[in-house]
Amino acid sequence: MRVHFVDRGGPAAIRVYPVTEKDLPRFLTKNPARIGAGGKKWLALGDFRGKPGSVIWLPDKSGRPSVVLLGIEGERDIWSYAALRQALPEGVYRIDAELSPDAATRAALGWALAGYSFTRYKKSTLKRPRLVWPKAADRGAVGRAADGIFLVRDLINTPAGDMGPEELADAAKAVARAGGARFSAIVGDQLLRQNYPSVHAVGRASSRPPRLIDIGWGSSGPLIALIGKGVCFDSGGLDLKPANGMLLMKKDMGGGAHVLALAQMIMAARLPLRLRVLVPAVENSVSGNAFRPLDVLQTRKGLTVEVGNTDAEGRLILSDALAEASTEKPALMIDFATLTGAARVALGTDLPAMFSNDDATAEALLRHGLAQDDPLWRLPLHKGYRSQLDSPVADINNVSEGGYGGAITAALFLQEFVEPGIPWVHIDLMAWNLANRPGRPKGGEAMGLRAVYALIAEKAASGAAAKGKSR
């Protein structure tokens, strides 16, 4: 956080005044000295009206900012503070307003997120203005959220040539070591010996062996299982994708990136819970031993799967991971996956689709999504569509016969591998920004991460409270 903030700015720190469009006239009337004699004229010339994300700074004699006005939507705004950072030149700034702890934390997070750049292959050209920490901000919460989001972005933005199954496992090992967690990986043909046949089948055609990444942490509290799709590149297999469909497939391990970031945040906060993280990491490639359309695959659960399409591989590798996670009967099981284009057709690229077998869990997650400005949208696990996955030769097909409701039928497929009675959430997300916006640059993106963290933190806190009462 040192590149984003300073502890004290001193008298030279440039003041930033956040105002809503509604409150701007009153602010100008009450604060003529802060704006200066020519300030109103300058604001008029800049047509500053306090719209969210709008920024204007009044220059001193040298042309540097002397006072900055920022338009915000309200106390819960995050992204206007991201726009603020992107609009300012180098310098030290401080927010001159009494912010609540929640508002201060959101302001600091927006500022921090606007400081992200992917620098593995070239130097950053971002400006580096710094903000005096807002007094009421929860610095730990800001740091955990920003670091988690930056991890997701970095992992997804890394080209597949440098982010294969082994490299994703290395990143997971680094997260585990930093948090004091247990780490293991089952690699290559060991997947067959230890009964993860679907992970092996999908990844065996690549020159880079598939693996199951496994992280465990904590010794008491409710068990939370996190499962992330880790397809490091998806060619579509023998049902080969066209060139434009392959272009963004380095992001197909975005689900794995999300659960690693969540694990990092949970461990950094020392939440009172037990954690199991599973990431099946593969590359879906084409070679002589690639799995084929209409092959029948074995799964860890014992169900057989007819392959209706080799490009629906994510649900296959997740089936083994979900079955394994179910054996421990977790208090909550959540999977993240860049699973279907159908979810993007239904909800667009910014809004993850969420499915759940538990209404209370789903409602709580939607509530946290709105509260964190990190929304999701629930789609139904409509049982009437399950018959579309029937197979004449196996227990289930990995795709439906028709092209309708593809996100729902994919979720229904996954549900077959979740043991009844386990509260389960499936998140189907884009994990990519198609265009630049304040604090959200084009490229890999965390979606639903802060909402899910808030849900897990709430569950951990309620579990700790219940344990305390029972003593």
Image (tube, grey):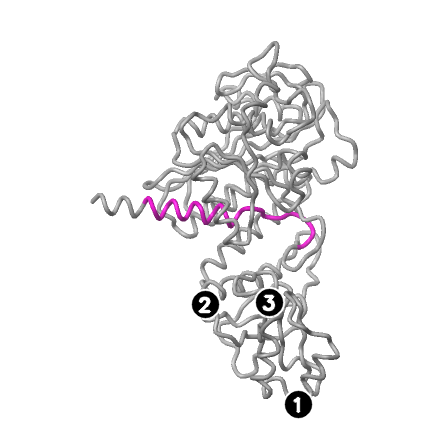
* Residue placed most toward the observer, 255 or 208: 255
Position of residue 178 measured from the top left corner of the image (x, y, whole percent): 46, 49
Give the distance between the C-alpha atoms of the residues marked 3 and 2, in whole angstroms. 15 Å
Position of residue 201 measured from the top left corner of the image (x, y, whole percent): 60, 21
Does 411 appear in magenta? no
Name of the residue lying farthest toward the right? 243
Q: Residues within 10 Å of mark 1 (few under 14, many from 20)?
A: few
* Sequence order check, earlier mark of 1 and 3: 1
Principal secondary structure, stretch drawn in magenta: helix
Residue topped by disc 1:
37
Mark 2 is on which residue type? Ser
* Sequence order check, earlier mark of 1 and 2: 1
Position of residue 436 measured from the top left corner of the image (x, y, whole percent): 70, 55
Span colored in magenta: 441-463
Q: Tell me if residue 228 comes above or below residue 403 in the rendering.
A: below
Q: Residue at x 61, y 10 (%)?
A: 392
Does 450 appear in magenta? yes
The image's mark for residue 100 is: 2
In the rendered image, which quarter is residue 421 located in? top left
In the rendered image, which quarter is residue 166 located in? top right
Give the distance between the C-alpha atoms of the residues marked 1 and 3, in whole angstroms. 24 Å
* Sequence order check, earlier mark of 3 and 2: 3
Mark 1 is on which residue type? Ala
Position of residue 222 measured from the top left corner of the image (x, y, whole percent): 35, 39
Mark 3 is on which residue type? Ile
* Residue placed most toward the observer, 152 or 287: 152
